[in-house]
Amino acid sequence: MAYWLFKTEPDAFSIDDLKTAPKQTTLWEGVRNYQARNFMRDDIKQGDLVFIYHSSCKQIGVVGVAMVTQQAYCDPTQFDLNSDYYDAKATSDKPRWVVVDVTYQYHLKKRVSLKDIKANNAITDIALKKGGRLSVMPVTKADWDEIIKMSMRE
DNA sequence: GCCAACGTTGGC
DNA sequence: GCCAACGTTGGC
């Protein structure tokens, strides 16, 4: 089983939206970055765990955990003229983008802020620390465990 | 295939 | 709202 981190802007879709969604599940739509797409298409498997990370907001950081409940399939929003994620260059013959389904697991007891992650030298590998803009990124088991640990500290 | 220009992300 | 960092586009 592998670990991941998905960014979302809580004004658009927050962890609370995931928790209250039908079956506490959503398709993670709108990823329009090839590196992130390749992770979703090739590497993210059913049963993998995902940190939900709130970006571009007041309270930036990891807020909870979700599970991948369906591996990659075609992102329907790429064909939807009314969607912000519409891509004129994607066709049903040659779709460009995929989604996975994620299901809510739990909120972290305490949000782990980006500031604290950056300040923690025990966290070494995560792309968040490198200022990257990747919206879907792998997390090592060591970093996963450390962030979980941080969420339980007072 | 290079690389300059442009657009987007996302923290501050 | 600013702007740095990065990804994408398009002319050559």
Image: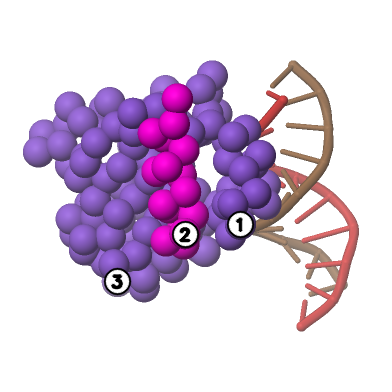
Chain colours: A purple, B red, C brown
Precedes in sequence: disc 2 or disc 3: 3
Specify the amino acid type for callout 1: Thr
Q: How many marks?
A: 3
**Extent of the magenta region:** A138-154
Q: What is the CA distance from the residue labelled 1 to the residue labelled 3?
A: 41 Å
Residue A154 spot, x, y in % from top left: 45, 25
Precedes in sequence: disc 1 or disc 3: 3
Specify the amino acid type for callout 3: Asp
Within 10 Å of disc 1 (Cα), the crowding (few <14, some 14-19, many 20+) is: some
Specify the amino acid type for callout 2: Ala
Q: What is the CA distance from the residue labelled 2 to the residue labelled 3?
A: 40 Å
Q: Are marks 2 and 1 in contact (CB under 8 Å)?
A: yes
Q: Which residue carries the number 1 mark?
A: A124
Residue A93's mark?
3
Helix, strand or loop at mark 3? loop
Residue A58 is drawn in which quadrant? Answer: top right
The residue sitting at the left extreme is: A23
Depicted A19 relative to depicted A67: above or below: above
**In the rendered image, residues at marks 2 and 1 fall on the same chain:** yes
Residue C6 spot, x, y in % from top left: 69, 55
Q: Which residue carries the number 2 mark?
A: A142
Within 10 Å of disc 2 (Cα), the crowding (few <14, some 14-19, many 20+) is: few
* Residue shown at 36% from the left, 73% from the top: A42
Query: Is residue A143 at all visible to an observer of this figure?
Result: yes
Precedes in sequence: disc 2 or disc 1: 1
* Residue shown at 42% from the left, 42% from the top: A149
Query: Is residue A8 at all visible to an observer of this figure?
Result: no
Q: What is the CA distance from the residue labelled 2 to the residue labelled 1?
A: 9 Å
Q: Is residue C1 left or right of residue A100?
A: right
Residue A153 is drawn in which quadrant? Answer: top left
Residue A84 spot, x, y in % from top left: 41, 38
Q: Is residue B5 left or right of residue A21?
A: right
